[in-house]
Image (cartoon, helix red, strand yellow):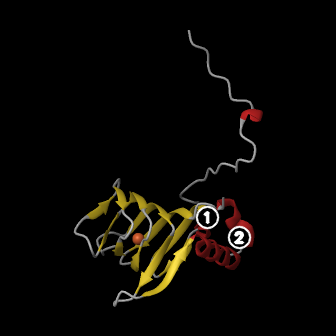
Amino acid sequence: MSSFPKPVPPERQPAGMVPELVLKALPDDERVWVPMGDQVWFRPLLLNSVEGYWTSLLRVRAAGVVSCHRHPAPVHGYVIKGKWRYLEHDWVATEGSYVFEPPGETHTLVVDEDCQEMITWFLVSGSMLYMDENGNINGFSDVFQRIELCRNHYIKVGLGADFVNQFIR
Ligand code: FE
């Protein structure tokens, strides 16, 4: 008969490690969703200021658009709800889909009228470079910009400037 394993004693955890993060990914409080534009919201999960990436849920309701941008570093995604597509590709990401986007991916995300709401988990490394119709960069996101965006939103909705800190490592 095997015995039930004992937990590793706390002193065996390495010194200096940062705290783990366990969240209810879909929050009960609507204010946790940070508006990103018309019909587009962002729910931070981990904002990694050491490795320069962030993981979050993206929520887009019909007929929302995430304007054209380039990813200089890879993106991973998992569709939790609904469906969406890129104008630049002929595939549709549907509930349960895993998506890998290689560095260089340049795309425009759309949710069509036949989908009320999509929610997708994304891991985005580095930055997003927003582009105009001529391919000129006219804006960017990185983890620090996301932290600032969250902080400003949480101040505005009454959760406070420190609310975002729980997501930062
Ligand atoms: Fe993208």
Task: Determine crowd level at label 2: few under 14, some 14-19, many 20+ residues with C-alpha closer than 10 A.
Answer: some
Mark 1 and mark 2: Cα distance apart in space: 10 Å
Res 161 quadrant in image: bottom right
Relative to 127, does residue 169 appear above or below in the rendering?
A: above
Q: In front: 146, or 24?
A: 146
- The number of discs equals 2
Q: Are marks 1 and 2 in contact (CB under 8 Å)?
A: yes
Find residue 5 and name its label: none
- Residue at 59% of width from left, 76% of height from top? 145
Q: Residue at x 61, y 64 (%)?
A: 29
The residue where tag 2 is placed is 159
Residue at 24% x, 65% y: name it: 91
- Please identify the residue farthest to the left as the structure is shown: 90
Percent position (x, y) of residue 4? 61, 19
In the shown orientation, is residue 61 left or right of residue 2?
Answer: left
Q: Quadrant of the C terminus?
A: bottom right
Residue displayed at 43% across by 70% down:
72
Instruction: In the displayed orientation, state which residue is furthest to the right.
Output: 11
Q: Nearer the viewer, mark 1 or mark 2?
A: 2
From the viewer's perspective, is residue 14 above or below residue 25?
above
**Secondary element at image label 1:** loop
Q: Amino acid at mark 2?
A: Leu
State the residue position of label 1: 29
Numbered disc 2: secondary structure: loop
Which numbered disc flags the more N-terminal residue, 1 or 2? 1
